[in-house]
Image (tube, rainbow, N blue to C red):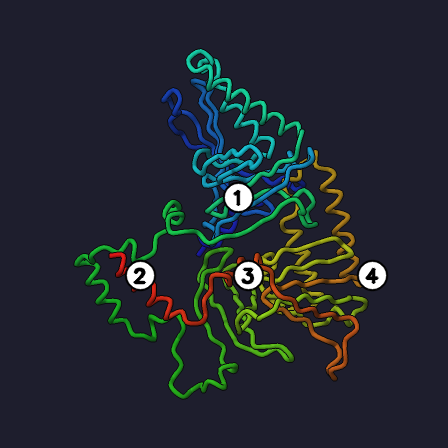
Amino acid sequence: METIAEQSDVFPKLNVEEEPELSATEVESMCMNCHENGTTRLLLTQIPFYKEVVIMSFSCDHCGYENNEIQPGGEIAPKGIEFRTEIVTPRDLNRRVVKSDFSCIRIEELDFEIPAQSQKGEVTTVEGIIDRVVRGLDQDQPVRRIQHPEAAEQIDAFISNLQKLKELERPFTLTLTDISGNSFVENPNAPQKDLATTISYFQRTKEQNHMLGIFAHDEVADKPSNDAVEESVKLESVPEEVDSLLKPIREGAWPLEELQGEVLQFQTHCPECAAACDTNMKVTTIPHFKEVVIMATVCDNCGLRTNEVKPGGGIEEQGVKIEVSVRGRIDFARDVLKSESCSLHIRELECEVGAGALGGRFTTIEGLLTAMREQLVESTGMFMDSNDAETKERMDKFFGELDAAIAGDKPLTIVMDDPTGNSYVQSLNDDGTPDTALRIIRYHRSYDQNEELGLNDMKTENYAEEEKTEEADKKENC
């Protein structure tokens, strides 16, 4: 258990103000340039507003060759990610970019693309990406001008166009697509919304999963060996009560109508220390709303406590936008259900929190603001060094205003936008009269919102007939 408890310190956080002593691991490795022995230094750390990474640096004392790269230290994200950023000002050129080995970068205006797995992962900037391309194209130009003068002339013209991008003679669009979901483009306006960047997530194809080394069980299942057959026999002999994730309920013990009185429990692994712990799950009803599923995890090893709320029903026909004016302590006590797909916007602070930032939770207005502050404090300092005084000053001012709001000294207007319609804020008038401090707007989702929720390709009627038609077409083609 001691080994598990120490696992949380494997990836220490970057904090410039506290200046923690981050210890790097040195490993002797072969230099790919001169084939002598060099030194590789490994540093496991956490990048604020991002995730765990492994920073690697290689140097060779024999030939002077140096190299550095970055690899994700955590798991592969459930979905791929795409950043589409408009580069307009010099500040945009200084945006930090974390790119993995599977990042594909495209500059739309030049019809130029850096394919995935053609470069190692690194922490760089938008300007650094352009500089690396220029260096790569320019390194063989002297020889190319002699052997292939026409090709060299075309490359010189393309390098000139890249230099013009750095000089911002015209705005351009940088698109970063990563099937592993382990890339990141800095928001220089954090915690405000980045109006110049559009972030979208997508489901990976089977081929993309194979590139990442992800295979389904039926894709890797060969003919079972004798050992596998014996093992399967052993598994089949395990009693259902022992092998089940959720322990079965005795017949008649809990009728369906009394399901809300049952707390289900199953084993999981703690996300902080990886120790085995129990997660409790219960179905309950929120008055004047709907059924929800509440899940709570408590780790006895490290003391971590988490809770999450998921809607018990499906996606509503319309999205919902809820505006609540917080003017006194009574408003802080309002019950709030925020789903995973709900984004949060505070007008007076010009702060916007994305849909997946705080997860799904059932809390109060005060609890929601406190959770948002804790998450921002935990991840603040995004690449903030001694020269980033502007960002530090902006964040200090923001936290001061947020603290004043939580203390009740500053009025707020909180806007919750949930395209699934599964979020809720309690009304203070139980008699059915309108709550003047609460405004609820229902709207029809856009095509892009339905696409992100996977509704555009979902067929709920006559799908059996469509399958029969497809099978008939296949037989005709054969």
In the displayed structure, 1 sits above or below 46; it is: below
Amino acid marked by disc 4 = Asp
Q: Is residue 99 left or right of residue 250?
A: right
Q: Earlier in the sequence, mark 3 or mark 4?
A: 4
Give the number of the disc on residue 473.
2
Residue that numbered label 4 is attached to: 409
- Single out the residue that lies furthest toward the front: 476
Residue identifier under label 3 = 450
Give left or right: position of 340 versus 458. Answer: right
Residue at the far top: name it. 146
Q: Compare residues 171 and 185 and report the one nearer the observer.
A: 171
| Residue at figure coordinates x 56%, y 37% from the top left | 108
Amino acid type, residue under disc 1 in the picture: Ser
Q: Which residue has dot 1 on it?
A: 183
Q: Evaluate if marks 4 and 2 touch, with contact meaning CB atoms under 8 Å apart.
A: no
Mark 4 or 2: in front is 2
